[in-house]
Structure formats: C-alpha cells, structure tokens
Amino acid sequence: METLYYFYNNFYKYLKKKFNNFYQIKISFLKLYLIFSLFIILVNFIYCFLYIQKFPEIVDSKNNYILENIGFNFGQVMKNLMDYNLLKAVYFDIDFYTSRMPLLPYFLKFLFNYFSHNFYIIHLIKNLFFSSIIFLLVIKISAKQNFILTMIILFSIFYNPHNLWTSLSFNFEEGILNYLIIILYLLFISDLRHKYLYLAFVISSLFFLKSSMFFLCFFLSVFFLILEFKKNNFGYTPLILLLISSIIWGSYSYKKTGVFAFANKLSSFNSFTLNHAYNKKFNDLYPQKSPDLLTEEISEKLPKNIFTNEWQVDSFYLNDSINYFKNNILDVFKGLLKKIYVILFYLNKDSQITSSDNIVKNDIRLSNIPNKIIFVIFLIKLISCFFNNKLNRENIFLMIVISFYFLPYLIGFIYTRHCTSMYMLACLHLTYTFFIRNEKFL
C-alpha cells in the first residue's frame, strides 16, 4: 500500500507540475498574442484612416471599398472580376488577360464577397491573417514562451513606418509580398517537421502574386531539391507545386490568349513596364522623378490598329527595349548603377512631385535611413561568409533570395517600396542571429 501511495503521490505531483507549466505557457502565449493583435488592429486603423484621408475616392460615404478605384492598374481588373468574373483589363483597346497575376485580385474579391465591404475590416482581416502566421512562426523559433525575445523579433519586422505602411496596403503586391518573404525565411530556419510542404505553398503563392517572383521561386525550389535530395523531408514538393502552378497559369493564358505564358512572359504587361527603363529620358528622370511620367509617351509610340492580341503588344515593347539596349549600352549601364544606388543609398521619397516652378521637392524619407544602414550591414555580413568559411545552407538561401528577388528590378527599374521585403528580411535575420544565436552583426 505504501508503494502504491508513493507512486500515486509522485504521479499526481508530476501531472500537476506538467499541467501548471502547460497552463502558464498557454496563458503567456494568449497574452502575447493579444498584445500583438491589438498592435496590428491599432496600426491597421491608423493606416486605413490616413489612406482614406489621402485618397477619399477609395471608399463611399459608409467607408465601403470601391474596388474599381484601386490604383496601380488594379482598379479595372477588380471591376471586371467583380462584374464579369474575368481577370482582364483593357489597354490600347485590347483585352489583356494576363497583365496581372491572380492572387491579389482573387483574395481581395474573396474578402469583399464573403466577409465585409468595409475598407477597414478587409484590411484588418488580411493583415491579421498574415501577421498571425508570422507570430506563430516567431514563437516557434524564439524559445516559445520567451516574452521579451519574441517581442524583440516581432519589433524587428514591423518597426519601420514605411515598411509597415507598404505591408498594410492592399493596392499593390507588396502588401502581401512582404509577409510572404518573412514567412518564407521563418519557415526555412524553423525545425517544423514538414516545413517543405509549407514552403511549397508559400512559393506557389509568390508565383501567383507577382510575375517577377518566378525566378526567385524557381531557383529556391531547385535549392530545396538539392538540399534535401537524399532525405525524406519533402524537399521536392516546392519544385513540383511550382511546375503545377506554372502549367495552370500557362494553360489559362493559352486558353484566353493563345500563348502559353511561362518564365519572363508570365505577364503580358511586363515589356511595356520594361520599356520605361529603356528610354532616352530614363536617366534624366530616375530616381528623382518617377519613370511612370513616360507612360503616355511610351503608349503613343505603339502603332495604332494593327495589334489584336496582348502578346503582340508585349513583343513590340520588348523588341523596342532590346534595340535601345543594343544602341545605348553605356546609358543602360548608368541606369543599372542608379538602380543599385536606389537599393543601397537613396534616402529620398520615390516619385518626387514637382512644384509649380517645375522644381523637384527634395523630401527625405527618414525611415529610409535605418533601412539602408541595416541592409548594407546585412550584405556585408553575407558577403563575408565567402572569406570566413561560413557558407552554410542558410547563407546560400539568403544569397538566392537577394539575388533573384532583385534581378528583375535591376533589369527593369525599382522603387523604394519594392525594396521593403528585403529590408524587413535583413532586419529580421540580423536580429535572429544576434539574439538567438549570439552572433555578432559583423
């Protein structure tokens, strides 16, 4: 009897201790998530309020989203998607079915149809959804219940006003892209059992979000395949799902346009955008003024009434850009240096507005200063791996991400908002290595 009592008493104490620990961890987790959620709710409200003040045409009198008034050529796409369930826009009097990738329009339509028409609520659902995934992954890599460490890592992602503003948005791809890049990194450094299955879905999402991400998606998928080739860790799934995604989008393009869209021809509007950077006026404008000022001029040089298909227009602008490149190699090189300068050192706001006397306002974006400093430190740390024999799997992963993320922009042109994904990634990586691994920044 004494033996049974001793066993019962000790087993009871063991269960009580385990339960109490679990309960405390659960309460700590819920408290931390509540604090984080309140932060997202607050900044989402501030963002929506300021955005409506700046662009009142985006909502009606009840703050319901007017989808056709979204900028960056998404308005027309959203109108046709809502009215006719067609992912198309009309440019040059021609139907363009592949000018935009489908993830953002369909995700926005889904929220609008099934959750709310309210501008505030739609943005809140989007931002809370993606930030909650990031929160869970940060908890996973930051000693779980470690409150301070978790908050430091979360702060490193969301501290910068411009990065945060870009991420909260829903009128260009970076409003989802910034989250996906962070999720991609957190998944890779995590020890989740089936993380490559999750990575496969993230890579496929990147593919369907923005056509320029194809190169990043492809080379990362090949890297995962090589990395896990002899292991049963599903390292092949990202490449398989990417190929399936490519076939789906290519088949859709072929059905609508007669052309199987693949690789650099995922979007039929790519070459029109590219032509802005291969223009004799580009270096005079960029980066002080937006190359979008050339849009009307570039549109006018398209011959009228001879094209019936979006890919014919795409080919015209691609050939025009190639001819400019062949005849103006020095100017193209100067433009490339300016793009690198924008990524690393340019502190002013993009698309500077000219005053009445045609002088560009030289407004500095203060949030650019820590962005550039952190990113340069990050690059120095990454490059030093070659000389310090630290070229491990994580550093190779980061090199692939940086190289193939920026590749399409260096060929075309880049704004500061396009850089925010990499600035957030750099800050997160440096914070993670310093606070979790106790490595020095340099």
Image (spheres, helix red, strand yellow):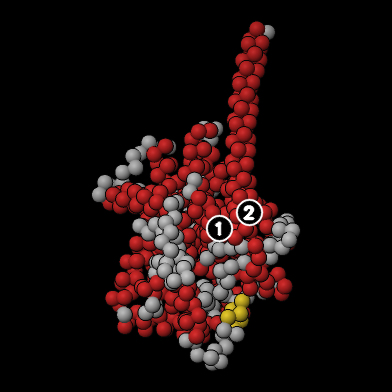
Q: Amino acid at mark 1?
A: Gly
- Residue at image coords 36%, 73%: 283
How many discs appear?
A: 2
The residue mark sitting in front, 2 or 1, is 2
Task: Give neighbour class at mark 2: few <14, some 14-19, many 20+ (Cα, 10 Å).
Answer: some
Q: Nearer the viewer, residue 167 or 142?
A: 167
Residue drawn 52% across and 76% down?
Answer: 269
Label 2, secondary structure: give it.
Answer: helix
Image location of residue 40, percent across then percent down: 60, 46
Q: Tell me the residue that label 2 is attached to.
A: 49
Local packing at callout 1 (Cα closer than 10 Å; few below 14, some 14-19, many 20+) is: many
- Residue 57, x across and y down, in percent: 66, 65
Residue closest to the eye, 1 or 158? 158
Q: Is residue 311 above or below residue 119?
A: below
- Name the quarter where the C terminus is drawn: top left
Q: Which residue, as the protein is rendered here, is positioned at the far top?
A: 2
Please tell me whether mark 1 sits on a helix, a strand or a loop: helix
Q: Is residue 345 above or below residue 96?
A: above
13 on left or right of 60: left
Q: Please state which amino acid type lies under the numbered disc 2.
A: Phe
Residue at 39 percent of width and 39 percent of height: 434
Which residue, given by chain and number where applicable, does mark 1 sit on? 175
| Residue 304 sits above or below residue 439 on the image | below
Comes first in the chain, label 2 or label 1: 2
* Vertical placement of residue 332 versus 235, above or below: below
Q: CA distance from mark 2 to mark 1?
A: 17 Å
Q: Position of residue 33 (x, y in %)?
A: 61, 39
Q: Is residue 249 visible?
A: no
Where in the figure is residue 116, as x and y percent of width and height? 73, 57
Examine the image and state in which quarter residue 255 appears.
bottom right
